[in-house]
Image: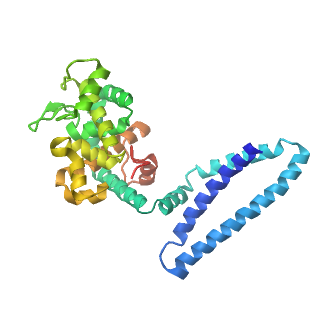
Amino acid sequence: MGFEIFSLGIALVAVIMVMLGYSATWFSGTRFFASLLPFAVFILVLIVFTAVLLIGWWQLRKRLQELWPPLPVLVAVIFTFGIVFVLIQGQFNHGFESFRNLVGGRQEDRRITLAHQVYAAYRRSDQVQLQKMIERGQKYFPVIMEAARVFEVDVNLLEGIAAAESSFLPRQSKDGGMGLFQITQIPNAVVEQVKYYLAVDKLSLDDPRQNAYVAAAELKYYLSEMNENLFLGLLAYNIGPANGGLQFIIKKYGVTNFVTIQPYLQELPRDYPIRVLSYSLAFRIWQQRGKLLAYEEGKNARIIQRIGIPGLEDNE
């Protein structure tokens, strides 16, 4: 009985989420009679319909049990698998997205706004130059993947940082940045952590492997400092610990997210998280599809949005 209830519960919850999502689209707006009232009536109808289905199942399961005691469980499992299979085919993605918007409110609105900034940055990129950069970075992928695995960060996200920092042309820059990830000032906690994992007494930032380890550890450090907020974590990574880092700006101006902090930043760091994530998206597309996709061609926009931006799936 417990397994049967669990199976039917999954199917029912999935269907309700999709139906609520579509209803939020159908009745979107703020007018009482055109939007709010119809939405409330739809919810009432959905509750009644669900109750009727449950009563109908209770009657059906009695007959199934008479034929063969395990039959109700078998039918429930098959029904649930059928519902889930249909829902994951992609035709109902709009319903799920609308449901997420309905529940997420302002936080989800911010996430969608920032996501489309990333998609727009990817669309504007020079695909030929982007492909050349990806090919140039292939020799560094093993050490980046190793560092990402050690510090449990998204490998595509780390690749995006390398692309934004050096375009996979390691060098020592005029502002003091060194190597593949243009490392400058490193928090003391990160230095000690990297030394421990590499089993060295002194770091050599000219070594791509050590450089990647430092970058991965820094990313992990700043994401934790920013409560796993991806955009603020990347921004903190770019600003570094100088003059109190991003924490100082947050406390000084009382801001809480990437949208509200942008007006207080200079032009360059404001753009940094978007650039990193557009590169990260390119690496994920290349990894999954074996080639880059032109955002504006055919159904590529939908395909790319389903692939998703690294690190942003469950983030603000």
The quarter holding residue 130 reads top left
Left or right of 200 on screen, residue 178: left
Q: Residue 227: percent from the left, percent from the top? A: 36, 46
Left or right of 301 on screen, residue 8: right
Q: On screen, 285 above or below 186?
A: below
Number of callouts: 0
Query: Who is closer to the viewer here, 70 or 160?
Result: 70
Q: Residue 46: percent from the left, percent from the top? A: 66, 66
Identify the residue at image location x=55%, y=62%: 21
Q: How is the protein colored in the picture?
A: rainbow
Q: Is residue 187 visible?
A: yes
Q: Is residue 132 visible?
A: no
The quarter holding residue 165 reads top left
Identify the residue at image location x=19%, y=33%: 169
Query: Who is closer to the viewer here, 241 or 118?
Result: 241
Identify the residue at image location x=69%, y=46%: 6
Q: Residue 74: percent from the left, percent from the top? A: 78, 43
Q: Residue 182: percent from the left, percent from the top? A: 19, 35
Please, which residue is most extreme toward the left here?
Answer: 174
The quarter holding residue 54 reads bottom right
Left or right of 83 on screen, residue 97: left
